[in-house]
Image: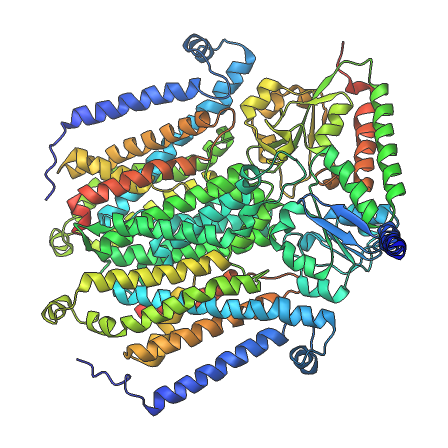
Amino acid sequence: MAAETALQPSSRVVSGLILGVVGLFLAVATGIQTGAVDLSWQQVWAVFTGDSTEHVHRVVFDIRLPRTLVGLLIGVHFALSGWLLQLLSRNPLAEPGILGISAGASLVAVIAFIVGDWVFSSGNPYNNASPALDYLSLFAMTGGLVAAVAVYFLGLSSGRLSPLKMTLTGAVIAGMLHALTTGTLAFWGHAHTELVAQWLAGSLYGAKWNHLSSLLPWTIIGLAGVGLLLRPLKVMQLDDEHVQTLGLPLNRWRAFALLIATLMAASAVGVAGPVGFIGLLIPHISRKLAGPGLSAQLLLCVVLGALLTVGADVVGRTLFSPYEVPVGVVSAILGVPFFLYLLSRQS
Amino acid sequence: MFDFRNLAIALLFALVVPAVWASDQSIELTDDRGATMRLSTAATQPAAISTFGADVSLALGVVPVAVTDYGLQGVPDYLSDQLKGVPTLGPRHQPNLEILSKLSPDLVIAIRRYTEKDGAHLESIAPLLALDLISLSDSLRAVELAGQALGAHEKAIKLNAHFLERIDELSALRKEKPATTIALLTSGSETPFIYYEHFLATALLGKLGFNSIGGALENPEEGIPLGYRVSLEALLELNPDIILMLPTSRQRAFTMNPVWPYLQAVQNDRVFEVPHYWKEGAGPIARERILDDIERLLLNNPENSPET
Amino acid sequence: MANHPNVPLYRAYGTAFLILAVLFVLGLMAGSRWVSPSSLWAVLNGGGDILTKVSVMELRLPRNLLGILGGAALGMAGAVMQGVTRNPLASPGLTGVIASAALAVVSLRTLANPDAFWLPLMALAGGFLGGALTFVISGRRQLQPERVVLAGIAVTSLATAVTTGLLLVSGAEAAELYYWLAGSLMGRGWVQLELVLPWLVLPMAALLAMHRPFKLLQLDDDLALAMGLAVGRWRLIFLLLALLIAAALVAFTGPIVFIGLVAPHIAKRMIGSEIKHWLPLTALLGALLLLSADILARQLAFPQELPVGMLTALIGAPWLIYLLNTKTSVRSA
C-alpha cells in the first residue's frame, strides 16, 4: 500500500503550487499579449491603467482577455473531468467523450444552428434573429447532460455501476448521436456548414465575458466537488474488497464523481464545443509527473490543463493569421505524438 | 404666465429643431436581425464580411477597408482587381476580430447567418448591418440598406431600378418563346445538389422564362435550406431542357454515372458551367454579371429554345 | 451460458433469404417514382419505357446490390473481429477502423484530386493504421473488451477531430464532404459497384472458405495451438481481411456504423452453437439490415433522401442497448 504523503504540506507541493500559479499567470499574460495584431507591453499595460486607444482596449479587454480566461477554465474542466473518469474506470484511456457528452452537445448545437432560424422566425421575414444562438451554450450543455444521464441509467447493471456496460453503452450512444449529427448537417446544413464545422472542431473564437460568467459557477462547483472527492477517491483506488470493509458507500461516491465529471465536461463543451484531447492527455501527463499522490495529480491537472488549452489557442490563432486553427484541432494534432508515445510503451 | 408660455414654446422649439436637424444627419437602419442601428453620418470605411459587402461597397464607389475571403482560394475572382491591397479578415464565418478592430471600420456589412453568433463582438467595433442574401428581394433590400448606410441611397435605388428594368427587358425578349426547364446544380459528388426557386440565381432564371425543376420551399421566406440533394432518378424524370452547373474543384462524379447521357440536356449539348459568383449573387456587380451570363449562354443562342 | 432456443438453421436461412429477396424487389420498385410490379417485370424482360428502364437497371439495381454486398461485408467484418479476438464488442466502428478509413478518404479528397481508383487503397491504409493503433494501445496481450472499446473510441475521436480540422480548410468542398461523411448509397451505380466488387467479394469468399481456422480461433489460444493452428498468424490474416472489406466499403459509401456490431449478435442468437454458420448468416443479416435501411432512407423523407448512416444508427443503437441489457454473454465478457 502506497503511503499517502501529499496531503501534508511539503516543500514539493508548495513549490509545485507556486510554479503552477506562476505558470498560469504567464499563460494569461501570453494570451493577452500575443495575437493577430502586434501589441507591445506598454500598450497592454496602458489598457489596465485606462490610458489606451479604443482599438487596443478592444483587443485586450473584449477579445483576448475573456478568450484566454475561458480557455483556462475549459482546460481545467476537461482535464479534471478526464482525470476523474480515468480514476473511476481505472482505465487510462477514459475521457469525457465516453459518456456521450460531446456527441449529445454536438447534436443539439447543430440543431440550434440550423433549426433555430425556422423555429423562432416571427412572421416578419426580416426579423430573423435566432434566439437559439443566444442560448447556444446552454442548449449544448443540456444536450451533453441528457446524453450522459442516458448513458448512466442505461449503463447501470442491476442498479450498480458497471464500467464495462457503461463504457459500451456510452460508445453506442455516442456513436448514434454522432451519426445523427453528421446526418442532420448533411441533410439540412448546406447553408451553415462552415459555421457548424467551426463549433464541432472545438473553438474559442468569439469567447466573451458572458461565456466566462456562465462557466465560472460550474468551475466552482466542480472544484468543490473534486475537493470533496479526494478522500473517497483514494479509498476507491483500493480494490473493492478492501473498500467494502472500510464501509464506504461506494456506489454513491462513484455516482457523485460521475456527476462532477459530467457537469464539468458538459459546461465546457457548451461553451467551446468538443475539445477532445485535453481530457485524455492531461491526466496521463499529470500522473506521470506527480506520481500516485492524488492531490498532486489534481493540482497538476488543473495547471497543465489550463496551460495546454491557452497554449494551443495562442498557437492556433497566431500561426496562420488572419486564419485561426481551432483549439480542438491543435490539441488533436498534439494527440498524435501522444498516441505514438502510448504505442511505444506497449511494445 | 405669459412668460411661461413663451418659454415653453421656445423650449419646444429648442428641442425639436436640433432633433430634426440631427435626424437629417443620422441614419437609422433596421437590418435583417431586426436590430436597429444608428449611424451619425454616412459610413465611408466599411468592412465587408461576405462577398456582398465588398461587391456593394465597390458598386457604390467605396473601397472597403477589409474583406473576407475563401482561404486558399483568396477573394472572389470577379472583384479581385478592385480589391488589390485590401487586407483580408479570413473566412466569413470566422473573421479575425483583432484585425478588424485595428482597421477601425465605421460600418460592417455582413452576411447574417454566419455572423449572427458573434454579433456582439462585431458591434463593439462598428455598427453591424447583418443581411440575408439569399433571394431576389433579399438582394434588392440589402443593396438599398447598404446604400443608405454608405450615404449613397439614391445611387443604390438607381442600381436596383436599373437591375429590375434590365430583367424586364430581357424577359420581354423571351416572351413569345415557350418556357424552358432548367436545373441549377452544384457539387462534385455522386448526387448533385439542386437549388430551390427562391434562390437568387434560380429566381432570375425564372423571371426570364427558365423554370427551375428544383421546386420551391414551402415557406420561401425562411430562406434556408437553399436546395436539396436531387437523386439522379428524379433528375431523369424531370428531365430539364438545360443544366447549369456551378464550379467544383473535382470531377463531378454524377456526370460519370451511366444515367447521365440519358438526360436530354446532355444529349442536346445544353449543359453549361457558370462562374462562382452565381452562388453568391446578391451584390450589384455579381447580379448584373449573372444576367450577362444568362444572356450570353441562354438568350443570345437561338438553339436554346426547344423546338416548338 | 446463453439460454436461447436453437432456431433450426434451415428456418433461419430460409427466412433471411426470403426477406432479403422481398426487400430486393421492393428496392427495385421504390425510389423517386414507384414502379409497379408489372412494369418491373417488363423492364427485367428487356422492355418497358426508357425512364423506368434506366431508373431500375442503371440506378436501383446496382444500388441494391451494393447495399446487399456492403451490408454483408460490414456484418462479416464485425463477426470476424468479434470471433478472432473473442471480444463481443469488436466491430469496424468501435475499433476506429471506419473513422480512420473515412479520414484517409477525406484527406485525399481535400488535398488532392484523386481518381476513384485510389479511394479504396487510401481507405485501406487509413483503416489499417486506425485498427492497428487501437489494438496496440489497448494492450496486445490481453485484448480485454473494455480496453479495446476505449482505445477504439480514442482513435475514433482522434480521427474525427483531424477530419473536422481538414474540413475547415476544404472551403467549398466542406458541404460535400460532410454529406459524404453521413454515409449514403445515393447515386452509387455500376461504376462504384464494379470498383468495390473485387475488394469485397474475394475477401468474403476467402473468409467463408477458412471456416475451420475461424472456428478454432474462437476457442482458447492454447487449445487452438494444441490443434496445430498457428494462432498469431491466422488471427492477423482474419483481422486484415475484416479490415479490408470494411475500409473498402467506406471508400465508396462513407462511414456506415453499427451493422458490424448488430448483425453478428443477432446471428449468434439464431445459430446457437453452430459456429460454422455464424459468418454466412451474419452476411445475410447484414445485407438485410443495410438494404432495409437504404429503402427507408429513400422513402422516409420523400422526395428527398436521408443519409443511410443516420438510419443504421437510429435502428442499430436502440437494438444494441436492448442487447446489452438482455444478453449475458456481452455483460460477462
Residue A129 as seen in the image, left or right of residue C305: right
Q: Residue drawn 51% across and 31% down?
A: C191
Residue C11: image quadrant is top left
Q: Is residue B95 visible?
A: yes
**Residue B13 picture location, percent across and down:** 88, 52
- In the rendered image, which quarter contains the C terminus of chain A? bottom left
Front-most of A12 and A328? Answer: A12
**Residue B155 picture location, percent across and down:** 89, 42
Residue B36 as seen in the image, left or right of residue A340: right
- In the rendered image, which quarter contains the N terminus of chain A? bottom left
Front-most of C293 and B202? Answer: B202
Q: Is residue B224 above or below residue A80?
A: above
**Residue B105 picture location, percent across and down:** 78, 60
Number of marks: 0
Q: Is residue C115 visible?
A: no
Tell me, what colour scheme is on the image? rainbow
Q: In this view, does B50 lie above or below C194?
A: below
Q: Residue drawn 41% across and 49% down?
A: A143
Furthest toward the bottom, the residue is A11
Residue A64 as seen in the image, left or right of residue C288: right
Q: Residue drawn 62% across and 55% down?
A: B118
**Residue B196 picture location, percent across and down:** 64, 29
Q: Residue drawn 30% across and 39% down?
A: C318
